[in-house]
Image (cartoon, rainbow, N blue to C red):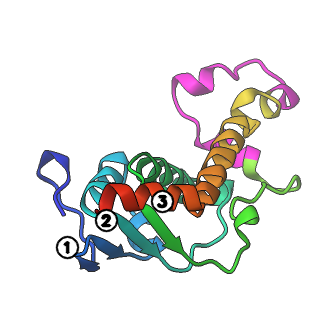
Amino acid sequence: IPVEFGRNFIVPECSIKHKIAKITFDQIFDKPTGSADYLALANNFHTIIIPEIPQLSAYTKEQTRRFITFIDEIYNKNVLLYFSSDIPLKHIFSNVPSNSNYHQEIYESLQGDRLDQFINKTDSEIVNSDIFSGKHEQFAFKRALSRLYEIQSDEYISIHKKIYLQ
């Protein structure tokens, strides 16, 4: 399907006529995709099927952010999402274990100006700064989870039918 700036997004299993797409989690979120790609999907398909969504966390940061952006785009267009997962929906976004190296990994990945804010700070001050708190991710997780539940609601499906199936 066409995406902005002359790019295309490959949807291996779809019916353009019926506006239904089936795509794996890896095919859409394991590569550098973004809002424009998800908007193109939402504009071309009113129903999207994603089998086998894994548990998402800060360890899968890029895929998690992409998935959350995807949920935002399809939600705004009232697209139906059918998905499967071995993880119960309420646990699809996991917390980072307290004994993990997550904070150190983020610290080591920072570069340039973002790193300057930590000069002359103690390890404790660095680890306890907002950048490591996960507050932004927790908010995004909660919003996406709420939207995933709403996408399954009778009201959402009813609105979807009025928009796309009449």
Look at 48% across and 59% down and name the residue there: 158
Is 12 included in the stretch rendered in magenta? no
Q: Which residue is mark 3?
A: 158
Q: Is 112 inside the magenta-drawn segment?
A: yes
Which image quadrant is residue 135 in? top right
**Nearer the observer, 150 or 54:** 150
Q: Residues within 10 Å of mark 3 (few under 14, many from 20)?
A: few
Sequence-first disc among 2 and 1: 1
Residue at 87% in and 30% down: 124
The kind of residue on which mark 1 rests is: Ile
Residue 58 visible within the image: yes
Quadrant (top left/top right/bottom left/bottom right) for the C terminus = bottom left
Expressed as whole percent of the image width and height from the top left, the position of residue 13 reads 29, 81
Q: Position of residue 129 (x, y in %)?
A: 77, 27
Q: CA distance from mark 2 to mark 3?
A: 10 Å
The boundaries of the magenta stretch are 103-125
Can you say which quadrant of the picture contains the N terminus?
Answer: bottom left
